[in-house]
Image (tube, rainbow, N blue to C red):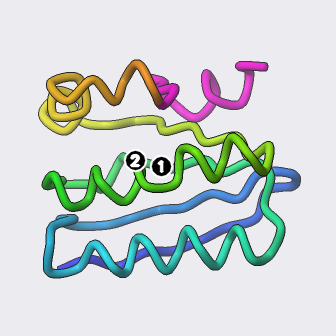
Amino acid sequence: MLSIETQLENPNHILIPKGEIDASNSVQLDESIRKLLEEGAKSILVDGSFIEYISSAGLGVFMSYLEDFQERGVSLKIFSLSPRVLEVFKILGLDRLIPIFPNKEAALNDK
């Protein structure tokens, strides 16, 4: 099961997925990101603290937006991933495409 909260800490929009992200619910992640873009978000931080598992479908959602983010000048950063989930990002090379930080403070301080 997946639940996703969003918070606004100007100018950052913080996305907080909780649970497992897989093919059965990755559309929820997609809808949450699309909604932030429609609201004009320019800085999206993903709090990975509560992501228990992410499948290739979940990773695909992030990948599908990379070009769109670049064209719109949107910054995407992910922080606080568990070692197991971080390893999945690394295996697929996403850690070279999406900035990943150990904690929220490091993500906020990165310019």
Judged from the image, the secondary structure of the residue bearing numbered disc 1 is strand
Question: Disc 1 residue type?
Answer: Asp
Question: For residue 75, which quarter of the picture?
Answer: top right
Circle 2 sits on which residue?
63
The structure residue drawn at horizontal position 32% and vertical position 37%, both measured from the top left corner, is 81
Image position, residue 4 (x, y; %): 43, 75
Where is residue 46 drawn, in percent x and y? 51, 50
In the picture shown, does residue 33 fall above or below 10? below
Q: Are marks 2 and 1 in contact (CB under 8 Å)?
A: no
Where is 54 relative to 37, above or below?
above
Q: Does 38 sit above or below residue 49?
A: below
Q: Is residue 36 left or right of residue 53?
A: right
Residue span colored magenta? 98-111
Which mark is nearer the camera, 2 or 1? Answer: 2
94 relative to 10 in the view: left or right: left
Q: Could you say where residue 24 lies in the image, as x and y percent from the top left?
A: 14, 80
Q: Dot 1 corresponds to which residue? A: 47
Q: Is residue 53 visible?
A: no
